[in-house]
Image: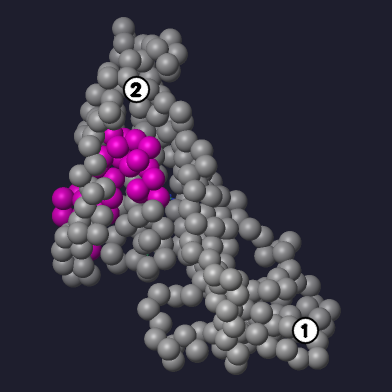
Amino acid sequence: MEIKKFENVVWLAVKEDERDVIEVREAPQMDVRLVSYPKDIEKLIAFAARATYKGHVAETVKDVPLGRALNMVQTVVECGHGSVWEHAVFTFDIRNISRACTHQIVRHRMASYTQESQHYISYDKLMVVRPDKLDKNQLTMFTEACKEAFMKYRGLIESGYPHSEARSVLPNAVAARLVMTVNARSLYNFFGLRCCARNTWEIHTLAWKMLAMCKEISPTLFAAAGPRCWQLGFCPEGRNTCGTRDYDVREFGALRSATSKKP
Ligand SMILES: Cc1cc2nc3c(=O)[nH]c(=O)nc-3n(C[C@H](O)[C@H](O)[C@H](O)COP(=O)(O)OP(=O)(O)OC[C@H]3O[C@@H](n4cnc5c(N)ncnc54)[C@H](O)[C@@H]3O)c2cc1C
């Protein structure tokens, strides 16, 4: 097998035969973008929360004074009144993650998804996400497996089999793109489960990236968000616990101590 470099991407396998050039390459780094969120998140949540009290109702979202909005959000976060957080909806554009990871994400039912289609796309090059911490031998095994699967996929298509069915032989490592729209309450649940050290590296990394974005957008709303040990004050994983909350605190301590008020 020949290893070739191409710009900033490692080409894992390039094999030529009479029919085709088989190309399997490593996907660029995971790319997460927060593409949409409410302009005045705290005001929006306070606007909804104030509807519960007679005499506190604001006519419009922007009528809610910012200071009062921040206090209200802090109160509903501390009380865990999650239904009010549902008014804040976020859309993430997530690229260069594996199909294995997209499958884990879409298990979170309280969200809306649109995913790059293997039904409509026929791959003439295969982009894969390399799993974490492979040694040299394991990387070779991984590469060979992806190459073999891709060769069979191309072979099936060239023999007249539809690509929408031939995709069954493709590996879980195939790079994918997913657009996810999710509200703040469901994000708390997502972060609680997926920022936990028990997850595989890819969804774990993704969850922390998303959490960092949310904390930056609204430190007050996401003040208590993080792995479940942060949210609950104890680890509910029993004997499977990672043993220390310091694991995340060390790596992401700055996030945890994010202020609860916007400047
Ligand atoms: C470390 C880890 C290991 C995992 N291992 C496995 C595994 O081995 N096998 C496996 O299948 N999954 C596994 N999962 C996935 C997990 O079981 C959940 O499917 C996934 O995390 C989505 O969580 P959720 O249901 O809370 O989220 P959502 O689907 O977003 O639901 C959010 C909340 O809404 C409520 N809710 C949603 N749907 C219903 C419903 N139908 N009835 C009642 N209440 C509902 C619940 O309160 C739920 O917590 C694992 C997850 C983690 C974090």
Q: Which mark is residue 46?
A: 2
Q: Which of the two residues, 260 or 79, is positioned nearer the viewer here?
A: 260
Residue drawn at the location 34% of the way across and 35% of the way down: 218
Marks 1 and 2, the one that precedes in the sequence: 1
Expressed as whole percent of the image width and height from the top left, the position of residue 2 reads: 60, 90
Q: Quadrant of the N terminus?
A: bottom right
Judge depth for marks 1 and 2 and give the one in front: 1
Give the SS element for disc 2: helix
The answer to whether residue 178 is left or right of residue 193 is: right
Packing grade of label 2 (10 A; few <14, some 14-19, many >=20) is many
Q: Which mark is residue 20?
A: 1
Q: Is residue 215 magenta?
A: yes
How many marks the image carries: the answer is 2
Q: Kindly give the residue lying farthest to the right in the view shown.
A: 160
Expressed as whole percent of the image width and height from the top left, the position of residue 173 reads: 53, 73
Which range is magenta? 210-237
Give the SS element for disc 1: loop
Residue drawn at the location 16% of the way across and 60% of the way down: 246
> Looking at the picture, which amino acid does disc 1 mark?
Asp
The answer to whether residue 134 is left or right of residue 103 is: left
- Ligand 1 quadrant assignment: bottom left
Q: CA distance from mark 1 to mark 2?
A: 60 Å
Q: Which of the two residues, 148 or 252, is positioned nearer the viewer here?
A: 252
Q: Which of the two residues, 112 or 211, is positioned nearer the viewer here?
A: 211
